[in-house]
Protein backbone atom coordinates (compact mmCIF):
# COMPACT_ATOMS: atom_id res chain seq x y z
CA UNK A 1 0.00 0.00 0.00
CA UNK A 2 1.41 3.39 -1.01
CA UNK A 3 1.41 5.49 2.18
CA UNK A 4 -0.12 8.91 2.76
CA UNK A 5 1.19 11.81 4.87
CA UNK A 6 0.32 11.55 8.55
CA UNK A 7 -2.17 14.44 8.66
CA UNK A 8 -4.99 15.11 11.14
CA UNK A 9 -8.61 14.86 10.01
CA UNK A 10 -10.73 17.85 9.09
CA UNK A 11 -8.07 20.08 7.59
CA UNK A 12 -9.14 23.15 5.63
CA UNK A 13 -8.66 23.42 1.88
CA UNK A 14 -5.76 25.87 2.18
CA UNK A 15 -3.85 23.39 4.36
CA UNK A 16 -4.60 20.43 2.10
CA UNK A 17 -3.35 22.49 -0.85
CA UNK A 18 0.07 22.63 0.79
CA UNK A 19 0.34 19.34 2.71
CA UNK A 20 -1.61 16.50 1.01
CA UNK A 21 0.22 14.08 -1.29
CA UNK A 22 2.87 11.51 -0.37
CA UNK A 23 5.24 11.32 2.60
CA UNK A 24 8.74 12.68 2.06
CA UNK A 25 11.42 10.27 0.87
CA UNK A 26 14.09 9.05 3.32
CA UNK A 27 16.09 12.15 2.37
CA UNK A 28 13.53 14.31 4.19
CA UNK A 29 12.88 16.93 1.50
CA UNK A 30 10.43 19.71 2.43
CA UNK A 31 9.50 20.58 -1.14
CA UNK A 32 7.91 17.68 -2.99
CA UNK A 33 10.31 15.52 -4.98
CA UNK A 34 10.19 15.35 -8.77
CA UNK A 35 10.44 11.77 -10.05
CA UNK A 36 11.64 12.01 -13.65
CA UNK A 37 11.72 8.30 -14.49
CA UNK A 38 9.88 6.22 -17.05
CA UNK A 39 10.04 2.95 -15.12
CA UNK A 40 10.66 1.54 -11.64
CA UNK A 41 12.97 -1.26 -10.49
CA UNK A 42 11.64 -4.33 -8.66
CA UNK A 43 13.55 -6.42 -6.11
CA UNK A 44 12.88 -9.70 -7.91
CA UNK A 45 10.91 -11.23 -10.80
CA UNK A 46 8.10 -12.55 -8.60
CA UNK A 47 7.48 -9.09 -7.15
CA UNK A 48 7.47 -7.59 -10.63
CA UNK A 49 4.89 -10.16 -11.72
CA UNK A 50 2.61 -9.35 -8.78
CA UNK A 51 2.87 -5.63 -9.43
CA UNK A 52 2.13 -5.92 -13.14
CA UNK A 53 -0.88 -8.08 -12.28
CA UNK A 54 -2.14 -5.41 -9.83
CA UNK A 55 -1.83 -7.88 -6.95
CA UNK A 56 0.51 -5.51 -5.13
CA UNK A 57 0.24 -1.72 -5.19
CA UNK A 58 3.46 -0.15 -6.43
CA UNK A 59 4.80 2.11 -9.14
CA UNK A 60 5.54 0.18 -12.31
CA UNK A 61 5.60 2.50 -15.30
CA UNK A 62 5.03 6.24 -15.46
CA UNK A 63 2.42 5.99 -18.19
CA UNK A 64 -0.04 4.91 -15.51
CA UNK A 65 1.63 5.61 -12.18
CA UNK A 66 4.31 7.97 -10.89
CA UNK A 67 4.94 9.37 -7.38
CA UNK A 68 4.89 13.00 -8.50
CA UNK A 69 1.69 12.52 -10.47
CA UNK A 70 0.11 10.70 -7.52
CA UNK A 71 1.02 13.58 -5.21
CA UNK A 72 -0.82 15.99 -7.50
CA UNK A 73 -3.78 13.63 -7.84
CA UNK A 74 -4.15 13.12 -4.11
CA UNK A 75 -3.87 16.83 -3.41
CA UNK A 76 -6.45 17.82 -6.02
CA UNK A 77 -8.85 15.07 -4.90
CA UNK A 78 -8.59 16.29 -1.32
CA UNK A 79 -9.31 19.85 -2.41
CA UNK A 80 -12.31 18.80 -4.53
CA UNK A 81 -13.66 16.53 -1.80
CA UNK A 82 -13.51 13.34 -3.87
CA UNK A 83 -11.96 10.00 -3.02
CA UNK A 84 -10.04 9.70 -6.29
CA UNK A 85 -8.36 11.63 -9.08
CA UNK A 86 -6.48 10.74 -12.26
CA UNK A 87 -4.11 13.16 -13.97
CA UNK A 88 -4.13 13.52 -17.75
CA UNK A 89 -1.98 15.15 -20.40
CA UNK A 90 -4.48 18.00 -20.93
CA UNK A 91 -7.97 19.14 -20.05
CA UNK A 92 -9.25 17.79 -23.36
CA UNK A 93 -7.62 14.43 -22.58
CA UNK A 94 -9.53 14.43 -19.29
CA UNK A 95 -12.85 14.76 -21.13
CA UNK A 96 -11.79 12.11 -23.64
CA UNK A 97 -10.76 9.71 -20.89
CA UNK A 98 -14.02 10.25 -19.02
CA UNK A 99 -16.18 9.32 -22.01
CA UNK A 100 -13.94 6.46 -23.18
CA UNK A 101 -13.87 4.98 -19.71
CA UNK A 102 -17.54 5.27 -18.82
CA UNK A 103 -19.55 5.10 -22.05
CA UNK A 104 -20.03 2.74 -24.99
CA UNK A 105 -21.68 2.75 -28.41
CA UNK A 106 -25.40 3.33 -28.04
CA UNK A 107 -25.07 5.61 -25.01
CA UNK A 108 -26.30 9.20 -24.96
CA UNK A 109 -24.91 12.42 -23.41
CA UNK A 110 -26.74 15.63 -22.58
CA UNK A 111 -24.32 18.54 -22.68
CA UNK A 112 -24.50 22.29 -22.28
CA UNK A 113 -24.27 24.13 -25.60
CA UNK A 114 -22.09 26.69 -23.81
CA UNK A 115 -19.12 24.43 -23.08
CA UNK A 116 -15.64 25.24 -24.36
CA UNK A 117 -15.49 25.08 -28.16
CA UNK A 118 -13.08 22.15 -28.30
CA UNK A 119 -15.22 20.21 -25.83
CA UNK A 120 -18.25 20.77 -28.01
CA UNK A 121 -16.38 19.52 -31.07
CA UNK A 122 -15.06 16.50 -29.17
CA UNK A 123 -18.53 15.47 -28.07
CA UNK A 124 -19.80 15.90 -31.63
CA UNK A 125 -17.00 13.62 -32.83
CA UNK A 126 -18.08 10.86 -30.42
CA UNK A 127 -21.08 10.30 -32.69
CA UNK A 128 -18.73 8.53 -35.11
CA UNK A 129 -18.24 5.88 -32.43
CA UNK A 130 -21.90 5.52 -31.54
CA UNK A 131 -22.12 7.93 -28.59
CA UNK A 132 -24.62 10.67 -29.42
CA UNK A 133 -24.81 14.05 -27.68
CA UNK A 134 -27.74 16.45 -27.32
CA UNK A 135 -26.75 20.06 -26.66
CA UNK A 136 -29.05 22.19 -24.53
CA UNK A 137 -29.21 25.61 -22.92
CA UNK A 138 -26.79 25.88 -20.00
CA UNK A 139 -29.34 27.49 -17.70
CA UNK A 140 -32.66 25.91 -18.77
CA UNK A 141 -33.32 22.96 -16.46
CA UNK A 142 -36.41 22.10 -18.47
CA UNK A 143 -34.30 21.69 -21.59
CA UNK A 144 -31.94 19.34 -19.76
CA UNK A 145 -34.86 17.28 -18.51
CA UNK A 146 -36.54 17.19 -21.92
CA UNK A 147 -33.33 15.97 -23.59
CA UNK A 148 -33.07 12.92 -21.35
CA UNK A 149 -33.52 9.51 -23.02
CA UNK A 150 -33.64 5.94 -21.73
CA UNK A 151 -30.02 5.52 -22.90
CA UNK A 152 -28.72 8.78 -21.38
CA UNK A 153 -25.68 7.89 -19.30
CA UNK A 154 -24.03 11.26 -18.66
CA UNK A 155 -24.81 14.95 -18.22
CA UNK A 156 -21.87 17.29 -18.84
CA UNK A 157 -21.76 20.94 -17.82
CA UNK A 158 -19.15 23.67 -17.49
CA UNK A 159 -19.92 26.27 -14.85
CA UNK A 160 -19.27 29.12 -15.18
CA UNK A 161 -19.16 28.70 -18.93
CA UNK A 162 -16.53 29.96 -21.35
CA UNK A 163 -16.73 32.85 -22.24
CA UNK A 164 -20.12 34.18 -21.05
CA UNK A 165 -19.79 32.91 -17.43
CA UNK A 166 -23.24 31.31 -17.51
CA UNK A 167 -23.87 29.40 -14.29
CA UNK A 168 -25.88 26.20 -14.07
CA UNK A 169 -27.51 24.74 -10.98
CA UNK A 170 -25.21 21.81 -10.18
CA UNK A 171 -27.45 20.33 -7.50
CA UNK A 172 -30.49 20.39 -9.78
CA UNK A 173 -28.57 18.80 -12.65
CA UNK A 174 -27.30 16.12 -10.28
CA UNK A 175 -30.89 15.30 -9.36
CA UNK A 176 -31.89 15.03 -13.04
CA UNK A 177 -28.93 12.77 -13.76
CA UNK A 178 -29.29 10.52 -10.75
CA UNK A 179 -33.07 10.11 -11.19
CA UNK A 180 -32.27 8.64 -14.62
CA UNK A 181 -29.36 6.50 -13.43
CA UNK A 182 -26.83 8.74 -15.18
CA UNK A 183 -23.65 10.49 -14.06
CA UNK A 184 -23.12 14.24 -13.82
CA UNK A 185 -19.71 15.57 -14.83
CA UNK A 186 -18.82 19.22 -14.22
CA UNK A 187 -15.94 21.13 -15.76
CA UNK A 188 -14.65 23.23 -12.84
CA UNK A 189 -11.94 25.01 -14.81
CA UNK A 190 -13.05 28.62 -14.20
CA UNK A 191 -13.62 28.32 -10.45
CA UNK A 192 -11.29 25.51 -9.36
CA UNK A 193 -11.85 23.98 -5.91
CA UNK A 194 -10.74 27.28 -4.38
CA UNK A 195 -14.17 28.75 -5.22
CA UNK A 196 -16.41 25.78 -6.02
CA UNK A 197 -16.55 22.07 -5.22
CA UNK A 198 -19.11 20.46 -7.54
CA UNK A 199 -18.84 17.03 -5.86
CA UNK A 200 -20.28 18.54 -2.67
CA UNK A 201 -23.26 19.71 -4.76
CA UNK A 202 -23.89 16.23 -6.14
CA UNK A 203 -21.62 15.97 -9.21
CA UNK A 204 -20.10 12.53 -9.75
CA UNK A 205 -17.04 13.68 -11.68
CA UNK A 206 -15.12 16.96 -11.79
CA UNK A 207 -13.05 17.73 -14.88
CA UNK A 208 -10.08 20.09 -14.91
CA UNK A 209 -7.78 21.72 -17.36
CA UNK A 210 -4.80 22.07 -15.05
CA UNK A 211 -3.32 24.33 -17.70
CA UNK A 212 -5.47 27.15 -16.31
CA UNK A 213 -5.80 28.15 -12.66
CA UNK A 214 -4.34 24.98 -11.14
CA UNK A 215 -0.96 25.85 -12.66
CA UNK A 216 -1.71 29.55 -12.51
CA UNK A 217 1.24 30.88 -14.46
CA UNK A 218 0.74 29.53 -17.97
CA UNK A 219 3.68 27.11 -17.84
CA UNK A 220 2.39 23.62 -18.64
CA UNK A 221 -0.44 21.63 -20.23
CA UNK A 222 -2.26 19.34 -17.80
CA UNK A 223 -5.66 17.90 -16.94
CA UNK A 224 -7.44 15.76 -14.38
CA UNK A 225 -10.66 13.92 -13.55
CA UNK A 226 -11.76 13.82 -9.91
CA UNK A 227 -14.40 11.37 -8.74
CA UNK A 228 -15.05 8.14 -6.85
CA UNK A 229 -11.82 6.18 -6.45
CA UNK A 230 -13.51 2.87 -7.27
CA UNK A 231 -14.75 4.16 -10.64
CA UNK A 232 -11.48 5.85 -11.49
CA UNK A 233 -9.56 2.67 -10.68
CA UNK A 234 -11.97 0.28 -12.42
CA UNK A 235 -13.13 2.38 -15.40
CA UNK A 236 -10.63 5.14 -16.16
CA UNK A 237 -7.27 3.64 -15.19
CA UNK A 238 -7.56 0.68 -17.63
CA UNK A 239 -8.13 3.15 -20.48
CA UNK A 240 -5.18 5.23 -19.31
CA UNK A 241 -2.94 2.15 -19.29
CA UNK A 242 -3.96 1.29 -22.86
CA UNK A 243 -4.35 4.72 -24.45
CA UNK A 244 -1.73 6.70 -22.52
CA UNK A 245 -3.19 10.21 -22.09
CA UNK A 246 -0.62 10.45 -19.33
CA UNK A 247 0.34 13.52 -17.34
CA UNK A 248 4.11 13.95 -17.32
CA UNK A 249 5.80 14.02 -13.90
CA UNK A 250 7.29 17.46 -14.55
CA UNK A 251 3.93 18.97 -15.52
CA UNK A 252 2.33 17.30 -12.50
CA UNK A 253 5.00 18.84 -10.25
CA UNK A 254 4.35 22.31 -11.67
CA UNK A 255 0.61 21.93 -11.06
CA UNK A 256 1.28 20.51 -7.60
CA UNK A 257 3.21 23.63 -6.66
CA UNK A 258 0.55 25.81 -8.30
CA UNK A 259 -2.11 24.31 -6.04
CA UNK A 260 -0.29 25.71 -3.02
CA UNK A 261 -1.15 29.29 -4.01
CA UNK A 262 -4.46 28.58 -5.77
CA UNK A 263 -6.75 29.97 -3.09
CA UNK A 264 -4.96 33.27 -2.54
CA UNK A 265 -4.53 33.78 -6.28
CA UNK A 266 -8.23 33.22 -7.03
CA UNK A 267 -9.31 35.53 -4.22
CA UNK A 268 -7.05 38.32 -5.47
CA UNK A 269 -7.93 37.78 -9.14
CA UNK A 270 -11.67 37.61 -8.40
CA UNK A 271 -11.50 40.93 -6.54
CA UNK A 272 -9.68 42.58 -9.43
CA UNK A 273 -12.11 41.08 -11.93
CA UNK A 274 -15.12 42.44 -10.06
CA UNK A 275 -13.67 45.95 -9.90
CA UNK A 276 -12.83 45.81 -13.59
CA UNK A 277 -16.30 44.46 -14.45
CA UNK A 278 -17.95 47.31 -12.55
CA UNK A 279 -15.78 49.83 -14.41
CA UNK A 280 -16.57 48.26 -17.78
CA UNK A 281 -20.29 48.21 -17.02
CA UNK A 282 -20.19 52.00 -16.59
CA UNK A 283 -18.16 52.67 -19.75
CA UNK A 284 -20.23 54.16 -22.60
CA UNK A 285 -18.42 52.09 -25.25
CA UNK A 286 -19.44 48.82 -23.58
CA UNK A 287 -22.83 47.33 -24.37
CA UNK A 288 -22.87 44.50 -21.83
CA UNK A 289 -20.62 42.88 -19.23
CA UNK A 290 -20.68 39.25 -18.10
CA UNK A 291 -19.34 38.47 -14.63
CA UNK A 292 -21.14 36.40 -11.96
CA UNK A 293 -20.44 38.91 -9.17
CA UNK A 294 -22.41 41.64 -10.93
CA UNK A 295 -26.07 41.94 -9.83
CA UNK A 296 -26.89 42.28 -13.55
CA UNK A 297 -25.69 38.73 -14.20
CA UNK A 298 -28.72 36.47 -14.85
CA UNK A 299 -27.51 33.79 -12.41
CA UNK A 300 -25.93 36.15 -9.88
CA UNK A 301 -27.63 34.70 -6.80
CA UNK A 302 -26.96 31.10 -7.83
CA UNK A 303 -23.33 31.89 -8.60
CA UNK A 304 -22.75 33.53 -5.24
CA UNK A 305 -24.27 30.52 -3.48
CA UNK A 306 -22.28 27.91 -5.46
CA UNK A 307 -18.99 29.81 -5.69
CA UNK A 308 -18.51 30.93 -2.11
CA UNK A 309 -19.49 34.50 -2.85
CA UNK A 310 -16.77 34.93 -5.49
CA UNK A 311 -17.30 35.59 -9.18
CA UNK A 312 -14.02 34.23 -10.48
CA UNK A 313 -11.41 35.96 -12.62
CA UNK A 314 -13.02 35.88 -16.08
CA UNK A 315 -14.86 38.94 -17.39
CA UNK A 316 -16.43 39.09 -20.85
CA UNK A 317 -17.91 42.18 -22.43
CA UNK A 318 -19.50 43.29 -25.69
CA UNK A 319 -18.30 46.53 -27.28
CA UNK A 320 -20.67 48.93 -28.99
CA UNK A 321 -20.26 49.14 -32.75
CA UNK A 322 -22.51 51.92 -34.12
CA UNK A 323 -20.98 51.54 -37.58
CA UNK A 324 -22.07 47.91 -37.66
CA UNK A 325 -18.71 46.13 -37.64
CA UNK A 326 -18.60 44.44 -34.24
CA UNK A 327 -15.53 42.39 -35.09
CA UNK A 328 -13.54 45.46 -36.14
CA UNK A 329 -14.52 47.27 -32.94
CA UNK A 330 -13.47 44.30 -30.78
CA UNK A 331 -10.18 43.92 -32.64
CA UNK A 332 -9.39 47.62 -32.22
CA UNK A 333 -9.87 47.41 -28.45
CA UNK A 334 -7.73 44.30 -28.20
CA UNK A 335 -4.98 45.70 -30.43
CA UNK A 336 -4.78 48.93 -28.40
CA UNK A 337 -3.77 47.11 -25.22
CA UNK A 338 -0.13 47.21 -24.18
CA UNK A 339 -0.28 45.30 -20.87
CA UNK A 340 -2.80 42.52 -21.55
CA UNK A 341 -1.47 39.45 -23.34
CA UNK A 342 -3.35 38.67 -26.55
CA UNK A 343 -3.78 34.93 -26.13
CA UNK A 344 -6.69 32.53 -25.76
CA UNK A 345 -5.24 30.85 -22.66
CA UNK A 346 -6.53 31.86 -19.24
CA UNK A 347 -5.80 31.31 -15.57
CA UNK A 348 -2.46 33.11 -15.68
CA UNK A 349 -1.12 35.68 -13.25
CA UNK A 350 -0.82 37.84 -16.37
CA UNK A 351 -4.11 39.23 -17.70
CA UNK A 352 -5.04 37.75 -21.06
CA UNK A 353 -7.43 39.14 -23.64
CA UNK A 354 -8.98 37.37 -26.62
CA UNK A 355 -11.75 37.48 -29.22
CA UNK A 356 -13.59 34.17 -28.63
CA UNK A 357 -15.38 34.10 -32.00
CA UNK A 358 -12.08 33.90 -33.88
CA UNK A 359 -9.95 31.98 -31.33
CA UNK A 360 -11.28 29.62 -28.66
CA UNK A 361 -14.60 29.16 -30.50
CA UNK A 362 -13.31 29.80 -34.01
CA UNK A 363 -13.80 26.20 -35.18
CA UNK A 364 -17.53 26.35 -34.49
CA UNK A 365 -20.04 27.39 -37.10
CA UNK A 366 -21.56 30.85 -36.84
CA UNK A 367 -24.88 29.20 -35.97
CA UNK A 368 -23.26 27.35 -33.07
CA UNK A 369 -21.61 30.53 -31.84
CA UNK A 370 -24.88 32.44 -32.01
CA UNK A 371 -26.66 29.65 -30.11
CA UNK A 372 -24.04 29.99 -27.38
CA UNK A 373 -24.34 33.80 -27.39
CA UNK A 374 -20.82 34.36 -28.68
CA UNK A 375 -21.06 37.42 -30.91
CA UNK A 376 -18.39 39.12 -32.99
CA UNK A 377 -18.31 42.04 -30.56
CA UNK A 378 -17.49 39.87 -27.54
CA UNK A 379 -14.12 40.17 -25.77
CA UNK A 380 -12.96 37.87 -22.98
CA UNK A 381 -10.61 38.98 -20.23
CA UNK A 382 -8.96 36.57 -17.81
CA UNK A 383 -7.83 38.95 -15.11
CA UNK A 384 -4.41 38.40 -13.60
CA UNK A 385 -2.56 40.05 -10.73
CA UNK A 386 -1.57 43.38 -12.26
CA UNK A 387 -2.74 46.58 -10.57
CA UNK A 388 -6.36 47.09 -11.55
CA UNK A 389 -5.76 50.77 -12.31
CA UNK A 390 -3.21 49.82 -14.92
CA UNK A 391 -5.65 47.34 -16.46
CA UNK A 392 -8.37 49.99 -16.68
CA UNK A 393 -5.97 52.36 -18.42
CA UNK A 394 -4.93 49.60 -20.80
CA UNK A 395 -8.50 48.88 -21.86
CA UNK A 396 -9.42 52.56 -21.98
CA UNK A 397 -6.87 53.11 -24.75
CA UNK A 398 -9.07 51.19 -27.13
CA UNK A 399 -12.51 51.79 -25.62
CA UNK A 400 -12.13 55.57 -25.49
CA UNK A 401 -11.23 55.63 -29.20
CA UNK A 402 -14.38 53.82 -30.34
CA UNK A 403 -17.01 55.93 -32.14
CA UNK A 404 -19.51 54.98 -29.46
CA UNK A 405 -17.40 56.82 -26.90
CA UNK A 406 -16.45 59.82 -28.99
Image (cartoon, grey):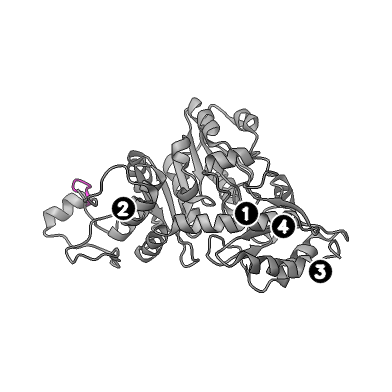
Magenta highlight on residue 53: yes
Mark 3 near mark 2, Cβ–Cβ under 8 Å? Answer: no
Residue at numbered disc 4: 280
For label 3, the SS is: loop
- The nearer-to-camera label among 1 and 2 is 1
Residue 308 position in % (x across, y down): 51, 44
Q: Quadrant of residue 316?
A: bottom right
Q: Which residues are magenta?
A: 52-56
Between the C-alphas of marks 3 and 1, the distance is 24 Å
Q: Which mark is residue 274?
A: 1
Between the C-alphas of marks 2 and 4, the distance is 40 Å
- Residue 96 seen in the figure: no
- For the residue pair 351 and 107, the one nearer the viewer reads as 351
The residue at 62%/46% (across/down) is 292
Residue at numbered disc 2: 20
- The nearer-to-camera label among 3 and 1 is 1
Amino acid sequence: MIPKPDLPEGLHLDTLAVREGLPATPWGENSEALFLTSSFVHPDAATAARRFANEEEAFVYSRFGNPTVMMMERRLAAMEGTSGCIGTSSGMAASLLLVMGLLKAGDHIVCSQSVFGSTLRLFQDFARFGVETSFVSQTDLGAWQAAMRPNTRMLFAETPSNPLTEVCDVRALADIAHDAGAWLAVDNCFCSPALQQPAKLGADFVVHSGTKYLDGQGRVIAGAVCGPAELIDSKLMPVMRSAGMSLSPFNAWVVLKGLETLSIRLQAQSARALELAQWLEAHPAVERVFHPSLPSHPQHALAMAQQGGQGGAVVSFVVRAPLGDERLAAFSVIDATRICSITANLGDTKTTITHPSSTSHGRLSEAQRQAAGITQGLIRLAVGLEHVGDLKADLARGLDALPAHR
